[in-house]
Amino acid sequence: MKKTMEDPSKIIRRSIHTFLQHFHRATTAAAVALPFSTALLLSQPFFSSSSSSLHMKLNTLFRGAGFSSSLGFFNILSIKLSQTLSSSLLTLPFSLTFLLFSKAYIIKLLSNNHDSVYYFPLLRTYICNSLFLLSANASAFALFFLSFNILESFGFSSSNFYTVFSLSSAIIYSIILANAFVISNLALVSSTSSSSGGYTTILKACLLLRGRTSTALALALPTNLGLAGVEALFRYRVMRSFYKGDRDVTSIAVEATLIAYLYALFLVLDTIVNFFFYQSCVKNEEDQKICGEDEYSIKIQICETENTKICIKGPTSCQEIL
């Protein structure tokens, strides 16, 4: 008999309880991740300048691929992609050091294994995750390109078609990207259970997520909403005040540091949630394996009992069975 997956609300409650129970260590991990969160939030002012040329190149690429300028989704997508790429490049040194150090510290705390070095498996898996996310985006664009050109060759070129195709593409792209991020987060946490990490942990995460995608998405939603809320708070309280000049620079800097630290705390909580989700997946797999072995042993015992009954009937039957 197979056991069901642990409820997402229980994993979230256990994660919050662990976060509060080890709050002093969680705050230490957040302090380690503070340079990364600060760099990520401060990279937003560069979006209008550094991502404008990249946005134009992406628009040219989409039009060269055959996408019409009437598809508003791809105009928005090129803006978001240029912003994401610019931010990722600006924060890459911080993510490869401070962010991974913070994750390694939290995972070592939760796993109670203080002898292993978790940074290098995390580093290799993080690099593979970046390539995996690029591949997911490229696969999505190839799918949209083929679908759009096939449908357009059949005469679908009205404004209603462009609207429906943009909406459906946005939904499909969101699903692909959400699953890719869930796989990446689970692979990053599971890499600490092996000595190497890398692309094999991504394959392991894909196998663990079979039948558990809805649970993973439900767990990722609260922390991602929290991170998005902190980013919006930073834009409203820090960037808005900085451009308006209605406050002095010192108070803005202090508030920016506090908001960046809050963002780092959400990153720590997200690591804890992913760790407990990974443990739940592994435990569920082991329980299913044990249940399968128990069912097999029960069947063997029944067969042996039946053979014994047949043997009791007479030596002829026993000789035939033997």
Image: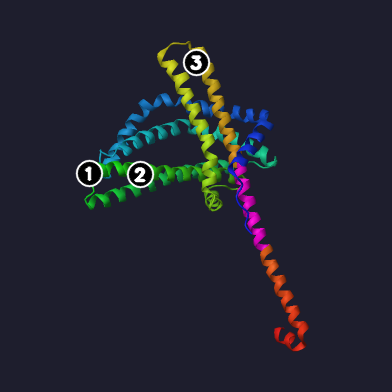
**For mark 3, what is the residue?**
252
Q: In this view, does 144 lie to the left or right of 109?
A: left
Q: Residues within 10 Å of mark 1 (few under 14, many from 20)?
A: few
Task: Indicate which disc, 2 or 3, sits on the residue closer to the N terminus.
Answer: 2
Number of the front mark, 2 or 3? 2
Number of the front mark, 3 or 1? 1
Task: Indicate which disc, 2 or 1, sits on the residue closer to the N terminus.
Answer: 1
Secondary structure of residue under mark 2? helix
Quick check: 224 above or below 236? below
Instruction: Find residue 9 and report its image quarter.
Output: top right
- Provide the residue span drawn in magenta: 275-293
Q: Residues within 10 Å of mark 2 (few under 14, many from 20)?
A: many
Amino acid type, mark 1: Ser
**For mark 2, what is the residue?**
169
Residue closer to the observer: 267 or 160: 160
Q: How far apart are marks 3 and 1 (CA)?
A: 50 Å
Residue 171 visible from this viewpoint? yes
Amino acid type, mark 2: Ser
Quadrant of the image containing the N terminus? bottom right
| The label number, if any, that marks residue 158 in the structure image | 1
Quadrant of the image containing the C terminus? bottom right
Pointer 2 and pointer 1: residues touching (CB < 8 Å)?
A: no
Residue closer to the observer: 14 or 160: 160
